[in-house]
Amino acid sequence: MDEMKANHVTPERYRKYGTGGELRLSTGFFQLDVRMIVKLVKQLVASSTGYPACYRLRLSDGAFHYSGVFVSASLQKQCARDMLVGNAENGGEILAITKMHMDSKRWVGKKADGTFGKPMLVIRAYELLSRGHPILSPGASHDGDKNRFTRFSSTSIYSVPWSDLSLTDKGTAPSAPVTRQPKPLDEVTPISMLTPHVSKWVICGLCTSKDEMKSVRSRGGQGLMKVFSFELTDKDGVAIRITAFDEAAPTTFDISYYVSGCTVKQSNKRFDITGHNYELSVTANTKIVPCHVDIGKPQPALKICPLSNVQSHKDENVNVLAIVDQINPVLEFVSRQGRPCVKRDVDLIDQSGTIVRLTLWADQAKQFQDTALGQAISIKGALVKEWNGSFSLSLASASRILLGPQIDGVSALLDWYSTERATADVKNNGLAAIDGSNTFERDLCFIASAKAFALKNGNVSSKGRYLNFKAMITSVKTDTALYKGCSNEGCSKKVVQVGSGQYRCAKCDTSMPTFKWAYMAQVELTDLTGSIWATLFSNAATKLFGLEAQHLGEMKRDNDGYVDILNSMSFKYFNWRVSARSTTYNEENRVQYTVLTCDPVPYDNYIVHLNDSLIFLQELQC
């Protein structure tokens, strides 16, 4: 301690590093390579890197933190004298790094994809300027790849008073740090840089989209409150979703605003079409001020999802750039609830040679012109849906569709369509997944895992979830595998016998002298972890047992091998594509499993999946 107190800041050092009586961090050093004044966040345990170092540090420059920093062993005595610790109670040091280099042959850790982690930075000389300062907000973690933060600009200044020429004594807290807010419009924060770790920021952008005002019940149940969302897009074309309550939101569309003081939270991908990882919520501290400086009309920065990859984004919003390959007629019908509906299906294709169906409803279906055939189309915020294993796109209220967009990639797409579409090997993403082959590895799981996931966590809704099991039939309810159905074309409703030789269908509201047999076979599926009961209807059951329901029903009547047919598929492994849906029976929530298809197990894919799973588990243990 005495040695530390005796270490004073010389006038020469004060003139070199001080700025107007303040000591400022070199904000953005890890990105911009400016002169380095940083804060020591924490002293870490030096890992076995094989490098002659006495300390490993996590440093912060006010915007980024970097944990792959090592102090050369030649500085061991200086580090011991300075007692570098890092936290505010015992240290909180601010350092000036005067000599440092990157060791291109050594790396710290590994990334999720197995590649090398952060490059090792080695400090060869430093000066201790001040200590005892509070811990900064974490900021963004820099991994040494400057290409990830190309849009970064210094948006705030972290500084502490530094008028006294001696170091602050250990245990005596200095004055609170000052974070200077940038002046509009020069140093506003790029929307791409917003994270929950950026404590002070101001963004500026154009209000490019607004939802209708909605009334929702408050969390406390005390009446209704108004809520709506809008999008703000900055000059770089990056947008973010902002949710406002009551009157605390912009009232004018298509003008620019400064926004600050919102809560930054994880984006809800189902409703947020901006592509940003975060969204903003307006609070009592939020400021929304009109910007009278013209920033121009920003060009949207769309992250395009190839149509071949939409199945990886189930129930998420994606941005699509494609060609209108086919337009089906407008279809008007009445829903099961008795509501009139208008629907139109449009087939899209892109350079991946994949066709995906876009379903339009109501006015969107009526207003979509036949002249769009063969044109380029961009969709911002198309919702990916899965039904019985097939994938399609639909539009939400916030989705935006544009014919003939003026964005990158359109010319190449049109050239491909005019020259290669006719000879392309086309894949239909709306049909290829029905057998579960394209989703086998993604949805494959053990039965016990599926049951625990569904029942304990409530993750299965009434809309359903699709799963794949490698399992065998261990039991069949032979008595109820068939039922008597309506003989009218297009109807399979169960009929009730009324009188002698008459059968009544409640759906068709008619009686008839005959019926047709239909499958509703309940089978027990078992793997090495457990079992479930699942139901097979006509298509899946006919494929499994190899007989039409009518033929099997005649065998049941004659008692000629009926049971043998139903048991013939027992104790054989299949790839079961199953729909799991939440149902309520006698006020009890249950999960109902329905078999969509059953196919031979694709063992090549299965073995790859098992190997990948083993590698993943081994890495977790490490």
Image: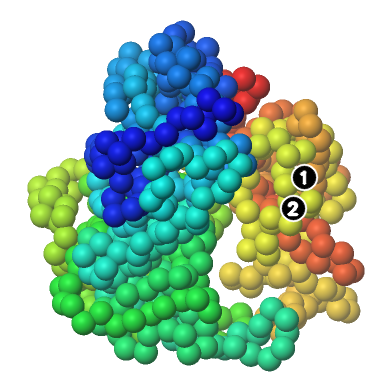
Estimate the x, y position of residue 184 in percent, counting from the top left.
25, 70
Query: Residue 570 falls in which quadrant of the image?
Result: top right
Estimate the x, y position of residue 573 in percent, counting from the top left.
69, 29
Residue at screen point 85% across, 46% down: 477
Q: Is residue 395 above or below residue 305?
A: below
Residue at screen point 72% across, 43% down: 450
Q: Look at the image and tell me in which quarter the N terminus lies.
A: top right
Query: Residue 618 falls in which quadrant of the image?
Result: top right
Question: In terms of secondary structure, where does tag 1 sit?
Answer: helix
The mark found on residue 452 in the picture is: 1
Total labels: the figure holds 2
Circles 1 and 2, Cβ within 8 Å, touching? The answer is yes
Report the amino acid beneath label 1.
Ala
Task: Say left or right for 159 vs 220.
Answer: left
Between marks 1 and 2 in the image, the one whose residue lies nearer the viewer: 2
- The crowding category of the residue bearing disc 2, from other C-alpha atoms within 10 Å (few below 14, some 14 to 19, many at least 20), is few
Task: Say left or right for 375 vs 556.
Answer: left
Residue in front for this viewpoint, 349 or 202: 202
Name the residue carrying label 2.
457
Estimate the x, y position of residue 4 in percent, counting from the top left.
52, 29
Question: In terms of secondary structure, where does tag 2 sit?
Answer: helix
